[in-house]
Image (cartoon, grey):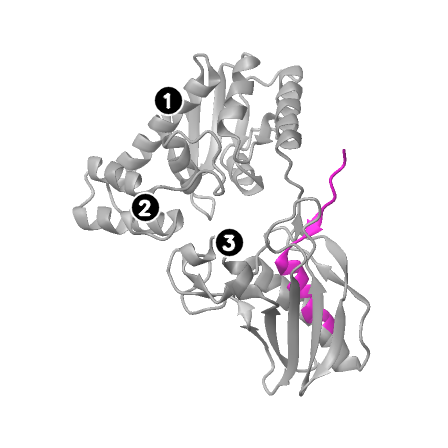
Amino acid sequence: MTLRHGFTTGTAAAAAAKAATLHLLTGSAQASVEVPLPVGERMTIQILESRLEGDGVMAAVVKDGGDDPDVTHRAVIRALVRRDAGADIILRGGPGVGTVTRPGLPVAVGMPAINPAPREQITQAVTEAMGEREGLDVEIRVDCGEELAKKTFNPRLGIVGGISILGTRGTVKPFSNAAYQATIRQCLDVMQACGVTRPCLTTGGRSERFLRQARPQTPETACVQVADFFSYSMKEVGRRGFDSVLWGIFFGKLVKQAQGHRYTHARSAELDLTILADWCAQCGFTSRVCQEVAGANTAMQALELLAPLPQSKALFSLLTGKATAFARLFCGREVRIGYLLFDFSGQVLHQSSEAA
């Protein structure tokens, strides 16, 4: 079965902003617009409405989650675009878009919860429509955004007043557990057929890119993006008799693996930073640091605190050791397991001895 792809809130906001800009500057409402995606591709989006509002234009798009519907599926994302005396594009969050109140997120405290990739996507879409003619004020809104946000992790993350505008790819890939597991099996089968001796498992495209940058000799055919399927992927590695595995991973997923979560998605495996704080104490971090880790908002915030400190090397070793033990348990056989731990810029923070 082929699952239908959708598009992100970031793409919806970019399309609404471009449509409003074109209507404002040309006087003509748009039935659809083509917008850039963060991955370098383009997509045509239908416009729900475009109308004059005060001294600007309001355009709206219905967000489509494809065959992977979530809380924001069918949400109405709006953009109000007005002329501005300056020469730049000013991007604001309006009603229904959350505001960040805690550190540890990709957006600074006090700013609207519009993540960096969609922020750039919206700006690029508006720039395409306006050329270099004038400055514009762009306000993103979400109908019923505050109510929708109550069904997300935003309140727990300290994002108040609405949802986040998200999307690193611009499209929503349908997420069927059965289909994803079949993909993992197929990739491992191909590796075996091609004579790959050490599968490289990553949780997504970015960690795979960083792994291949760190290990340039690694062919694409030796890599599989296993998402959150920690236990399942290791079981399939064991069934095929591989003797060695290399994981490319970020800090939050590593902590979850070290805690023994079989499936590491946030919906079913909540990150317990109090356990991480206990491990920090074992590694010699001060009680103050351990308390800050226990009260951190996200794994990113905890890592920013821990990484510069000399005890971090011992902590990273402890985490990869615990994750390795669970990986072997799930594998069901003795296998050499290595880890490459990356920060979000791709720097290798730690590598286990088996990853060398």
Question: Which dot, 2 or 1, sits closer to the camera?
Answer: 1
Q: Residue 302 placed where, x, y %?
A: 33, 48
Frontmost of labels 3 and 2 is 3
- Closer to the chain start, of discs 3 and 1, is 3
Secondary structure, mark 3, is loop
- Image quadrant where residue 9 sits: bottom right
What residue sits right under mark 1 in the picture?
Answer: 325
Q: Amino acid at mark 3?
A: Thr
CA gap, disc 2 to disc 1? 23 Å
Mark 3 to mark 2 CA distance (whole Å): 29 Å
Q: Earlier in the sequence, mark 2 or mark 1?
A: 2
Res. 307 mark: 2
Indicate yes or no whether the magenta region holds residue 289. Answer: no
Is 5 drawn above or below residue 45 in the view shown?
Answer: above
Which stretch did the figure color magenta? 1-19
Density class for disc 1 (Cα within 10 Å; few <14, some 14-19, many ≥20) is some
Check contact, mark 3 vs mark 1: CB within 8 A.
Answer: no
- Amino acid type, mark 1: Ala
Instruction: Kindly check if marks 3 and 2 are in contact, taking CB atoms under 8 A apart as contact.
Output: no
Q: Look at mark 3 in the image and give the residue it sits on.
A: 152
Quarter of the figure with the N terminus: top right
Element class at badge 2: loop
Q: Quadrant of residue 26?
A: bottom right
Q: Are marks 2 and 1 in contact (CB under 8 Å)?
A: no
Q: Is residue 286 left or right of residue 219?
A: left
Label 2 Cα crowd, 10 Å radius (few <14 / some 14-19 / many 20+): some
Q: Is residue 72 above or below residue 24?
A: above
Give coordinates of residue 181: x percent, y percent. 61, 28
